[in-house]
Image (spheres, rainbow, N blue to C red):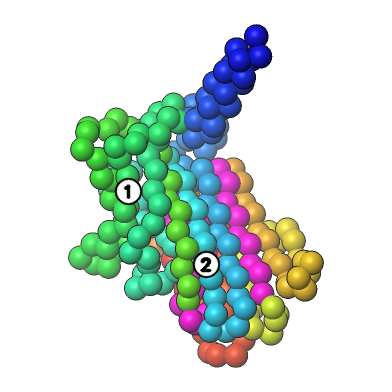
Amino acid sequence: MSRLFLFLLFVLFFNSANAQWNVNAISDTLLRNSTAVVRRYATDIKVFEEDEIVIAENLVITFLDDDALSHFRFCSIVNDSLIPKSMESKVFDLDGKRIKQANASILKDSISITRLRLISPIKLRFPLTIELEYKNTLNSISNIRSWKPTADFGVSVENASLRLTLSDTSLISYTCNRIPLLLKNVNEDGLYVFLWEISHFPSIKKGSSLELPLGDFPIITIMSKRKKSCLETI
């Protein structure tokens, strides 16, 4: 009886874990006018000194069709030239089940736009979800790009967060748009912690105007207080 209970508990846990990225769990509000949905975009930045910065990022995005994947711009907070050569990637199907034969990588095309590339020996059906996770070490705050959970028309955001930990608040300054600062305190190690979060941000529908509505997109820009730094635009 106890073995049966443990087996059923394992099956329940396994199915609930898979269901995390089930496409049917996305709200109608986020699907409306969307070609892709950022399910999770978690960025953790630790600034120990101006030349000692560690960044970890985890991105999970559901692409509703093949065209959405081919046009999606990968918006890492790390400067393009410093994107890691290796990272962990996973691909999930419509029901949130991992497709073990498939993975993803980052590709820079001829006009220096960074995109995602899906690699699979089998034909995949959309919608599907891609997860990327990696860590990078930087030697300058100037190598940190503006943090943008979405910078594309038709891409909504389910959950995204940016955590910034630093030893000295005189190292950086920041500006933010449409993303509230939820936390600013000192942790048990005496380090300053800042936390921004955004959730259920609907996609911006592309209009007929040629001008990008820059103020409509969520964005956080981190700058050095000790060196000149220019605000990055989308």
- In the image, 193 versus 9, the foreground residue is 9
The kind of residue tagged 1 is Ala
Q: Position of residue 228 (x, y in %)?
A: 53, 89
Q: Residue at x 33, y 64 (%)?
A: 85
How many C-alpha atoms fall within 10 Å of the one at disc 1: few (<14), some, or many (≥20)?
some
Q: Residue at x 65, y 9 (%)?
A: 1
Would you name the residue on which mark 2 appears? 55
| Up/down of 167 relative to 97, above or below | below
Q: Position of residue 231 (x, y in %)?
A: 51, 77
Q: Position of residue 99 (x, y in %)?
A: 35, 34
| Up/down of 225 relative to 41, above or below | below
Residue 92 position by quadrant = top left
**Disc 2 and disc 1: Cα gap in Å?**
20 Å
Q: Residue at x 68, y 61 (%)?
A: 195
- In the image, 89 versus 220, the foreground residue is 89
| Up/down of 113 relative to 175, above or below | above
Would you name the residue on which mark 1 appears? 104
Q: Residue at x 60, y 83 (%)?
A: 49
Residue 192 position by quadrant = bottom right
> Can you see residue 228?
yes
How many C-alpha atoms fall within 10 Å of the one at disc 2: few (<14), some, or many (≥20)?
some
- In the image, 129 versus 203, the foreground residue is 129
Residue 12 position by quadrant = top right
Q: The residue tagged with tag 2: helix, strand or loop?
A: strand
The kind of residue tagged 2 is Ile
- In the image, 83 versus 15, the foreground residue is 15
Magenta extent: 139-166
Q: The residue tagged with tag 1: helix, strand or loop?
A: strand
